Amino acid sequence: MLITTTNDVPGHRVEEVLGEVFGLTVRSRHVGAQVGAAMKSLTGGELKGLTRNLEESRQEALERLTAAAAARGADAVLAMRFDTTEMGGTWSEVCAYGTACRLARL
């Protein structure tokens, strides 16, 4: 599955647009990450536990996006974007979305 943030792919044409697809995950931060983040805010610097959580969330959202596109018969997702929302101070929603397509070589 080709996933790209561009609207087109050099050397290919969009043969069929299959519609918008999403991959969504909502995760909570564990107490240790919350305490570590609070302590780190006193000294500054990267919050490695929260960075790791966000990386894992993005990967999971991409996997779900890929599955949704494949279920529609797509071989590519164009104009892919991420959207992240914090909910309740301890939950993070990560959504990957884009347009499922079938491509043909020129």
Image: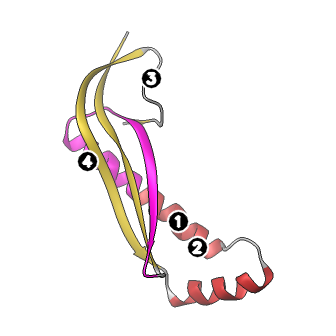
Question: Residue 16 location, x and y as percent?
Answer: 23, 24
Residue holding disc 4: 68
Measured Cα–Cα span from mark 4 to mark 3:
20 Å
Q: Give the range drawn in magenta.
A: 61-88
In the depicted structure, whether residue 42 falls above or below residue 5:
below
Q: Is there a contact, CB below 8 Å, between mark 4 and mark 1?
A: no
Q: Label 2 belongs to which residue? A: 50
- Label 1 and label 3: CA atoms lie apart by 28 Å
Farthest residue in the top direction? 106
How many C-alpha atoms fall within 10 Å of the one at disc 2: few (<14), some, or many (≥20)? Answer: some
Q: Look at the numbered disc 2 and give the secondary structure of its residue.
A: helix
Q: Earlier in the sequence, mark 4 or mark 1?
A: 1
Q: How crowded is mark 4: few (under 14 residues within 10 Å), some or many (20 or more)?
A: some
Mark 2 or mark 4: which comes first in sequence? 2
Under circle 4, the secondary element is helix
Disc 2 marks a residue whose amino acid type is Leu
Residue under label 1: 54
Q: Name the residue under label 3.
A: 9
> Where residue 95 appears, x then y in whole percent?
39, 57
Q: Which of marks 1 and 3 is nearer the N terminus?
A: 3
The reply to whether the magenta stretch includes residue 83 is: yes
